[in-house]
Amino acid sequence: MNRLKMLSIGVLIAVFSATVLTACSSNSSDSGASSSNGTTASGKKVTINYYDWTDEQVYMDKVVNGFEKKYPNIKVNANYIPTSDYQQKLLVNLSTGEDMDVFATSSTSNLAEYTSKQVLEPLDDLATSSDLAGISESIKQLNYEGHIYGLPYRTSKWVLYYNKDIFDKAGVAYPDSSWTWDKYEQVAKQLSSGSGQNKVYGSMSYQAENNWWRVLANIKGANNPMKPEDLQEFKKVLQYYYNLTNVDKAQQPFSELVGNAGNDYAGRFLQGNVGMMWNGDWAVQQLNDTISSKNVKMNYDVAPLPHWEGSEPATTGSYSVVMVNKESSHMDAAKTFAAYVASEEAAQIFASNGLLTPWNTDSVKQAFQSNVTTPEHVSVLNDPIKVLSQVPMDPLYNQVMNIMKEETTLYLLDKQSLDKTIQNMQSRFQKEVHS
């Protein structure tokens, strides 16, 4: 955790004690209380302040418009903060008493962090409402100490991307739902060929400091390396990932993946010399946009992620979550808006913009598929498959992941052994996180 973030959290904790003292006076005022239809006790129109990051503005503006049409007595003042500054801005708002009623986050670990600071309004009543029954299983994954403090409105799924031309040239059948990770490794080696400018790698390697290798543990239900049983799964898949590169020679060496070029996985895939990669649903739009704008010739498709032998097929993902500030002076209106953001009606808006949601209804699927038609099997993203949480509801998760990234990077670059890597992680968790 960087120094600035630690300082801000410290401010949040210190000021929170002061804001609690004024909570009763600010929330009990008749002039600020709102009824279920969004009007104040005096019948005036309610205005609530919503905060989000700039990447979401295009489609979130449409959601706000839909909400205001449905609830004409509630005005939503949407504030969009640059993505790089967003989390810091939220901490400042929460610590200084900024008029912020509803806000969003892209990480359930952030949700857990805010919840642990006791700055969120419980949303148990919304979580069990019939309007959100269609995403009840997703909501349950956000349970924190017996309560729900955030509602999921977007989700992600990881799938397998593959270059059909490379498969065709090698005479290898395309991936399907029967694939295991052993099969993936076998085919990755089979697709790898050539040298120099003509080198083809069967699988995509990411930069050593990138921890997307953990997806292979996430699909077995392991997402928190502070749990001993999860850490063992992380160890197994880390070795698998290391072997793909350093033993099988089926991935580009980590030492070559430096700077922006190494970080541009989409650009590297579109160069046409990588057979497969596991990646999130967002890569579809990235690839399609580049193919269209730069007239790139790429014949790619997607398939379900492979599964481990003996485990049922699954994918992983994380949720974007909407929350309500417990100090909101228009609580009913704020909660009404939060419920709408997580509703099936809003999900259709997200889906029509090429985004995945927790909703699995026909109307939401149709909204997605009518707007995202490439690649051929893009419907895989909407297949009914178990989605396991990629990020735990743990306020310490971000700090833990930074430690894991530092230690696993050394292992992938052959600067320390796997056993030493795990030992260092356990030791640092104890000293830096639990102390």
Image (cartoon, rainbow, N blue to C red):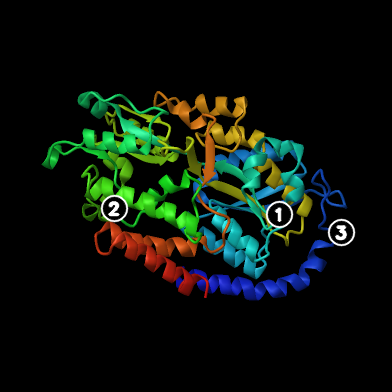
Residue 30 is tagged as 3
Q: Amino acid at mark 3?
A: Asp
Question: Of callouts 1 and 3, which one flags the residue occurring earlier in the amino acid sequence?
Answer: 3
Q: Is residue 270 visible?
A: no
Ranked by sequence position, the earlier of labels 1 and 2 is: 1
User: Are the residues tagged 1 and 3 within 8 Å (C-beta)?
Assistant: no
- Identify the residue shown where x is 51% and y is 37%: 355
Horizontally, residue 157 falls left or right of residue 263, namely right
Q: Amino acid at mark 2?
A: Asn
Which kind of residue does numbered mark 1 sit on? His
Q: Residues within 10 Å of mark 2 (few under 14, many from 20)?
A: few
In the image: residue 400, left or right of residue 49: left
Q: Position of residue 18 (x, y in %)?
A: 71, 75
Residue 340, given in percent of the width and then of the height, sits at 69, 41
Mark 2, secondary structure of its residue: helix
Viewer-nearest of discs 3 and 2: 2
Q: Mark 2 — residue?
A: 260
Q: Give the percent coordinates (x, y) of residue 64.
A: 64, 42
For marks 1 and 2, give the one nearer the viewer.
1
What is the number of callouts on the image? 3
Q: Which residue lies under the disc numbered 1?
A: 147
Q: Residue 46, position in %: x, y?
A: 77, 50
How far is mark 1 from mark 2, CA to CA? 42 Å
**Residue at the spot 21% in from the left edge and 27% down from the top edge:** 170
